[in-house]
Amino acid sequence: MNLRLPAWLRQGWRRLPWRGSTGRLLLLTLAVFAGMAALSPDRFLTRANLESMAFQFPELALLAFAILLTMLSAGIDLSVVATANLAGILAALVLTRWWPGLADGPAPFAVAAAGITALAAGGACGTVNGLLIARAGISPILATLGTLQLYTGLALVITRGHAVYGFPDALLFLGNGLWLGVPMPFWLFLGAAGLLAVLVNRTAFGVEARLLGTNPLAATFAALPVRGVLFRTYLASGLLGGLTGLLMIARTNSAKADYGSSYLLQAILIAVLGGVNPAGGFGTVLGVSLAVVALQALGSGFTLLGFSNFTREFVWGLFLLLIMVLNRLGRTNRQP
């Protein structure tokens, strides 16, 4: 005898979150936490380790958000880490050299000056990228590869290769302090994730960016402001880079032109792992957030277990391939 489930139960099953790519990533993230907790029960789920993770991953998350934005429109921003470094250096120089007495003045004023400088620098870098791509018509990968070298070179010229350090305690609190028992970088991550989710899902800009990434030719014939969408996309990416630069100098108490040299590949890995389509048109803030948490949990667990960096990179690649295969199988099963 064939049993047929009630319609409401079948519909509920179809709507379960794990049936999508984000849901599968959520299950794998939970599996990572469970596995690492089982392998290192006395250290992984301790408050100290969870706090350490919450201090570290927001930087990568912000960079991955910038990659998410640009990939939505079928592009990429290879200069986002260089933008973050340049923005952090300029903010650091304002605090230590270019504005005498600023660091010794009112703490909120010093932090605000550093924040405005970092965001302005990030916005300027994003503007250059946007003009090259939207106005000059240069492909995103070539344009941002060129500006990556430009921004890195400018940072080296300004600092002569030396680190800038010695920031006021108020700025260091932004990268190392706790508010309501939660690390400040994690609060910044939550705020950026919330704003970006609204931008991508609830604004005309987000819809236009998705349409442009899905079918650029159709977007052009539909009279979408293609140049405007591209320009705003890379401007937003630059602002995220500026915010990342501020967070990096606040956490490390130093600014250097080559800081986070491996962050670019990690940010791209996180974005793709989070379900962002490199060809454009699809990606979620939640998926990217889960991906960065999963990779941070893996990295933290491997450190506690004494694994080498080579093992970590191998497992990260394996994790990425597993997610891509699952997403591919999910798309195949949905096809008629």
Image (cartoon, rainbow, N blue to C red):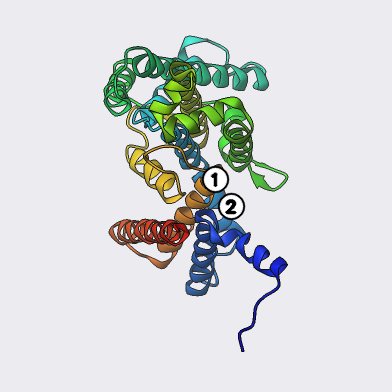
Whole-percent x, y for residue 279 in the image: 37, 39
Q: Observer-nearest residue: 226 or 56?
A: 226
User: Looking at the image, which residue is at 35% across and 64% down?
Assistant: 307
Name, please, the residue furthest toward the bottom: 1
The answer to the question of whether label 2 and label 1 lie on touching residues, with beta carbons closer than 8 A, is: yes
Q: Quadrant of the image for the C terminus?
A: bottom left
| Amino acid type, residue under disc 2 in the picture | Glu
Number of numbered discs present?
Answer: 2
Whether residue 91 is visible = no
Whole-percent x, y for residue 150 in the image: 29, 19
Residue bearing mark 2: 51
| Amino acid type, residue under disc 1 in the picture | Phe
Q: Tell me the element at label 1.
A: helix
Q: Tell me the element at label 2.
A: helix
| Location of residue 206 with respect to 100 vertically, above or below | below
C-alpha span from label 2 to label 1: 6 Å
Is the residue marked by circle 2 packed among few (<14), some (14-19), or many (20+) residues within 10 Å?
A: some
Q: Observer-nearest residue: 334 or 319?
A: 334
Residue bearing mark 1: 55
Q: Quadrant of the image for the N terminus?
A: bottom right
User: Looking at the image, which residue is at 65% across and 78% down?
Assistant: 4
Q: Observer-nearest residue: 182 or 107?
A: 182
Whole-percent x, y for residue 301 in the image: 45, 63
The image quarter in which residue 130 lies? top left
What label does residue 120 carry, if any?
Answer: none
Whole-percent x, y for residue 102 in the image: 58, 14
Q: Observer-nearest residue: 38 or 333?
A: 333
